[in-house]
Image: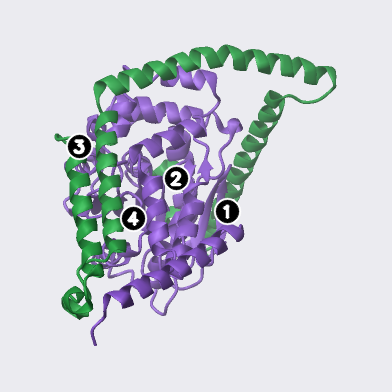
Amino acid sequence: MTNSNPPDFTEHWRQSLEEWAQAWTALAQPPAEAEQPAEGGKPATTPAEVWKRSMDRWLGAWSGYLEESMARPEFIAATGKALSRSLDVQKPIKDQTEESMKRWLEAVNMPSRNDITRLARQMNDITARLDEMGDRIEELIDAVTAIRGGDTHAGSLVNESGAPLGAGRWS
Amino acid sequence: MTTTSADYMRDEMARNAQRVARGVELIVDQSEARVGHTPRQIVGRRGKAKLYHYPAQGETKAALPVMFVPYLGISRTYIFDLQPGASFVEFITKQGIDFYLVDWGDLGPEDREFSMEDAVMDVIAAFVQRTLRHSGAKELDLFGYCMGVSMTMSFMATHPNAPIHALVMMVGPVDFTHGGSFGLWSSKEHFPVEKLLDTFDNAPLEYVQLGFKMLQPTNDAASAVNLWWNLWNEKYVDGYRAMNRWSNEWVGFPGEFFRQWITWFYQENRLVKGELILRGKRVDLATITKPILIVAARQDKIAPPASCKPLVDAVASVDKEYVELPGGHISLIAGRQAHQNLWPKLVSWLREREPKAQGKRNGASKA
């Protein structure tokens, strides 16, 4: 997945400069010579196009080079170590800040971040339970309709005898 | 008529003037780009997860609805309905297909315990039922995208009798030994995932963001150059604004899910080895026999083709096809090129497998 040959930046610069010079020369020449009637009467390149192509190539070369560098074991080991060390520093600071903040908030009768997270988690659980109950009620309605001989849609939700089929029945 | 150098210089100067004018407009106009134009409604919920229904458009309606399971966290799902003319959802619904999109929601610190099991065994299972109920169909086609592939395949393996007709798995890594740069960076030896989650509730957004930026280190500079180059073009600028909005809106990655994703998938490669166990059930991909289309993108750095292709051999389906298209992870689904490449292919693949006997569904659907 990585390039075996790192990009040659000197060669890239040389090509870009050559193209750039050619494009400007073509534009600076008298019209009769500059008109390179290629297809559609348009010269092959203009300085703007050369600039764009050069930038694309330059960025592409850098991208390839950086990607290759970041896939090297040395880079991966170094970033892993740096991350680990930064977490070693961050954790105690974070814990201590949270603890002090919690005490301060308690003193002024305010909920802490943990209190709010806990409440939000409870809300989540309640919402999920309500959604589940809603689905169950719909399944039961289908089952009752089937028993009464009515037409239930989504046949997969009830079996022939009208018993509700939850997702568990697919297992 | 021939064009002289002077004409080119004049044209270029005129274009530069347009660029400057549009650039000033872009700086002054701080309003958010409009995204997600296709009409939709919420038809199911499970906690924070929502199931959106995008009704089929057009006269003929496909026999089966499609349920689409994307990645969890990271970014928003409106990428699938970015702009008119460049919207996957718009394209699919215009082909007469009822489209159901799973949106995992804005996950915060309170979702720290949300796990792979919850996603696969609760949410996907409930939404499959919900899609069937709402659409009135007896079966559906299931799409997976990115890590949604691992989730849908896990669902299929743990629910072998689920009423799924066919599977379309897009740019989803399955064999994580070929997981590209993410695979290398998240190796067991070097990536301290437990320490990270011990420090933070969820995977910190800045770290996730940094990981994605590192995948394409010059991407921001290249976008700026391309923007300047196309700044005179109103259509391009509109597309850029929409894409720029999407790429700068990040969504939290629940801690437990992130831990499982890194350790079970990237570090231990359990899915393809048949060692993944969800709530006591083994995820054996060899039990999957439904028709399956597997799509990979040639320039994909998140899910390189080598990580997607092993799914072909892992499943027991007789009717299976692998397609590798030019493009990247996102351009396959959100680029204007996708119109010509992937999307028509997906629709024709589904049409060829559409159940004949079932015919057209009635248009009525139940909430």
Q: Would you call the spot at circle 2 few (<14 residues within 10 Å), some (14-19), or many (20 or more)?
A: many
The residue positioned 25% from the left and 49% from the top of the image is A57
- How far apart marks 1 and 4 lie (CA) works out to 40 Å
- How far apart marks 2 and 4 lie (CA) works out to 26 Å
Position in image of residue B367 (x %, y %): 57, 61
- The answer to whether marks 3 and 1 mark residues whose Cβ atoms lie closer than 8 Å is no
**Which chain corresponds to the colour purple?**
B
> B98 above or below B223?
below
The residue positioned 32% from the left and 66% from the top of the image is B339
Position in image of residue B210 (x %, y %): 43, 34
Mark 3, secondary structure of its residue? loop
Q: Amino acid at mark 2?
A: Ile
Q: Is residue A41 left or right of residue A169?
A: left
> Looking at the image, which is closer to me, B355 or A88?
A88
- How far apart marks 3 and 4 lie (CA) works out to 20 Å
Q: Which residue is mark 2?
A: B124
Q: Which residue is mark 4?
A: B331
